[in-house]
Image: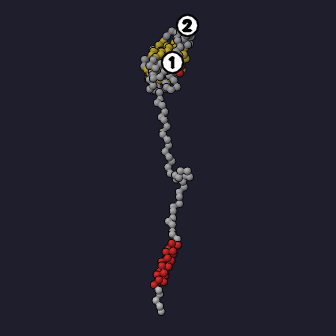
């Protein structure tokens, strides 16, 4: 038997190597499994269960109140509000009204002087409301319209004062307990003065 020729041996070896190489390339590669994507927002890609974005800047705080303690205050004292407004019951006394003013029977005419001192802003006197009561039961008292007394109206400039005179018919038996509630405006709480006449 003749020995195989050297060049045929080399050719067979090359073919064998080529077959092995081609067989290796043909083998399928196994891909690693990928995790299923979680639910997300189509536009942002942010998962639905992520915390909501922070809100904008906090709302502005309400303006400081211009309220003040209700009292009681006494004749000659002033109640002062945070905005600088002052209200004072300067005096309270019996008086003789004008001839055209009728005082109901059993009542005494009482004259009150109330002073308003504006604070940082002008004060509109027309916004004030006044309620007078008398006696232990706090009976409401009616104002006496005395044409001799001027009517206060308009505005008081900052740091300026204005005084008004008001008269009321108070039951003579209840002069020992008089309450004067002054409400300067919608933005202020009332201040209450207590007084008595012997």
> At 49% from the left edge and 45% from the top edge, which residue is drawn?
54
Percent position (x, y) of residue 186?
Answer: 52, 25
Q: Residue furthest top?
A: 99
> At 50% from the left edge and 46% from the top edge, which residue is drawn?
53
Q: Residue furthest left?
A: 77
Specify the label residue 145 is tagged with. none
Helix, strand, or loop for circle 1?
strand
Spatial CA span between label 2 and label 1: 31 Å
Specify the label residue 99 is tagged with. 2
Using the image as rendered, state which of residue 151 and residue 70 is in the foreground.
151
Percent position (x, y) of residue 115?
Answer: 46, 17
Q: Badges 2 and 1: C-beta atoms under 8 Å apart?
A: no
Callout 1 crowding tier (Cα within 10 Å): few <14, some 14–19, many ≥20:
some
Residue matched to label 1 = 155
> At 50% from the left edge and 43% from the top edge, which residue is drawn?
55
Using the image as rendered, state which of residue 181 and residue 34 is in the foreground.
34
């Amino acid at each position: 038997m003749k020995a195989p020729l050297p060049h045929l041996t080399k050719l067979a070896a090359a073919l064998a190597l080529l077959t092995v190489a081609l067989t290796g390339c043909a083998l399928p590669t196994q891909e690693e499994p990928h995790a299923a994507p979680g639910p997300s927002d189509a536009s942002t890609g942010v998962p639905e269960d992520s915390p909501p974005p922070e809100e904008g800047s906090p709302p502005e705080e309400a303006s400081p109140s211009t309220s003040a303690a209700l009292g009681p205050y006494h004749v000659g004292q002033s109640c002062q509000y945070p905005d600088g407004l002052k209200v004072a019951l300067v005096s309270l006394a019996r008086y003789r009204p004008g001839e055209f003013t009728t005082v109901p029977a059993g009542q005494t005419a009482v004259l009150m002087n109330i002073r308003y001192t504006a604070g940082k802003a002008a004060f509109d006197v027309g916004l004030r409301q006044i309620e007078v009561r008398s006696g232990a039961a706090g009976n409401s008292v009616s104002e006496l319209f005395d044409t001799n007394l001027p009517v206060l109206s308009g505005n008081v400039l900052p740091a300026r004062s204005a005084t008004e005179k008001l008269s009321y018919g108070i039951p003579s038996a209840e002069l020992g307990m008089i309450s004067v509630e002054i409400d300067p405006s919608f933005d202020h709480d009332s201040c209450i003065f207590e007084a008595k006449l012997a």
